[in-house]
């Protein structure tokens, strides 16, 4: 997967071009979608459904975008991710900057609502530690969400986990991209930010 290249703009189908435009503010998504476009007959169906899920249905769009960004950050390689010790906050047209700045410590945030914190924990734990989503957690979740809303969040999180991890492992050939180590704390590929770290990782791999 790491050697795949994005499809050139001139070869994108009109439907794929429309899908990519939807994520134009996220360069990793743009390039990742251009790689998915190698099999556009599948990508168009899957990503159209994902966009419909994000943009419509019952839950607020902002809440679902918070979940999507959290999943991207968990894979380390989103423009919304932290870089070293610097708290980098990329703008989002759907989420206020004050809320973006709270995502990585959502559980103790004084900005995010209880509803938003529960949604973020649902997305966070589904992708990293699903056993933490026990009966006690669902009791709390049902204090803020109906069962249909919980199922909607589950679809957002489940599709996001898969898509975000694929996008994180593509090597982006049209923009400067991080290199990747074998894994991070969430089981996905980890960004390698220096030659020294890359060499250190290689020395411990079989």
Image (spheres, rainbow, N blue to C red):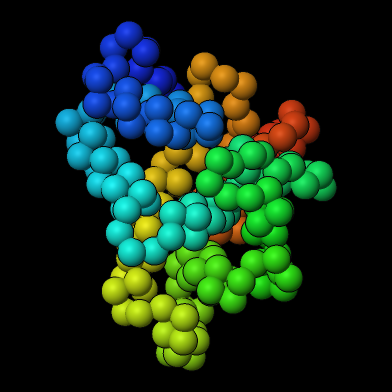
Location of residue 152 with respect to 89 vertically, above or below: below
Residue at left offset 17%, top offset 31%: 41
Q: Quadrant of residue 10?
A: top left
Give the farthest residue toward the right.
85
Residue 194 visible in the snapshot: yes
Count of residue discs:
0
The x, y position of residue 15, in whole percent, is 24, 26
Residue 182 visible within the image: no
* Residue 97: x %, y % from top left: 68, 48
Report x, y in % for residue 51.
Answer: 33, 44
Figure check: 51 above or below 143:
above
Please tell me whether residue 133 is drawn above or below residue 22 in the rendered image: below
Q: Is residue 9 left or right of residue 14?
A: right
Q: Is residue 53 above or below residue 149?
A: above
110 with respect to 157 (left or right): right
Residue for point 42% across, 85% down: 142
Residue that lies at the very extreme toward the left in this rendered image: 41
Q: Identify which residue is drawn at 45% across, 46% down.
A: 164
How far across and how far down the image is residue 166, in percent? Answer: 41, 41
Q: Residue at x 61, y 58 (%)?
A: 185
Taking 42 as reference, is 80 left or right? Answer: right
Q: Quadrant of the C terminus?
A: top right
Q: Quadrant of the N terminus?
A: top left
Question: 157 or 141: nearer the eye?
Answer: 141
């Amino acid at each position: 997967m790491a050697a795949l290249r994005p499809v050139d703009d001139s070869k994108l189908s009109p439907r794929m071009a429309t899908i990519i435009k939807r994520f134009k503010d996220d360069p990793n998504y743009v390039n990742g979608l251009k790689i998915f476009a190698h099999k556009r007959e599948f990508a168009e169906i899957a990503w159209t459904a994902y966009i419909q899920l994000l943009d419509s249905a019952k839950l607020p769009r902002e809440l679902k975008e918070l979940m999507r960004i959290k999943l991207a950050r968990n894979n380390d390689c989103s423009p919304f991710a932290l870089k070293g010790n610097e708290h980098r906050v990329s703008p989002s047209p759907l989420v206020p900057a004050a809320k973006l700045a709270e995502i990585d410590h959502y559980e103790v945030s004084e900005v995010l609502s209880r509803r938003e914190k529960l949604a973020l924990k649902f997305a966070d734990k589904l992708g990293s530690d699903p056993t933490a989503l026990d009966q006690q957690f669902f009791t709390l979740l049902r204090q803020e969400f109906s069962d249909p809303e919980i199922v909607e969040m589950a679809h957002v999180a489940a599709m996001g986990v898969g898509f975000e991890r694929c996008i994180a492992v593509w090597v982006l050939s049209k923009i400067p991209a991080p290199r990747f180590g074998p894994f991070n704390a969430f089981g996905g590929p980890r960004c390698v930010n220096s030659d020294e770290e890359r060499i250190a990782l290689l020395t411990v791999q079989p």
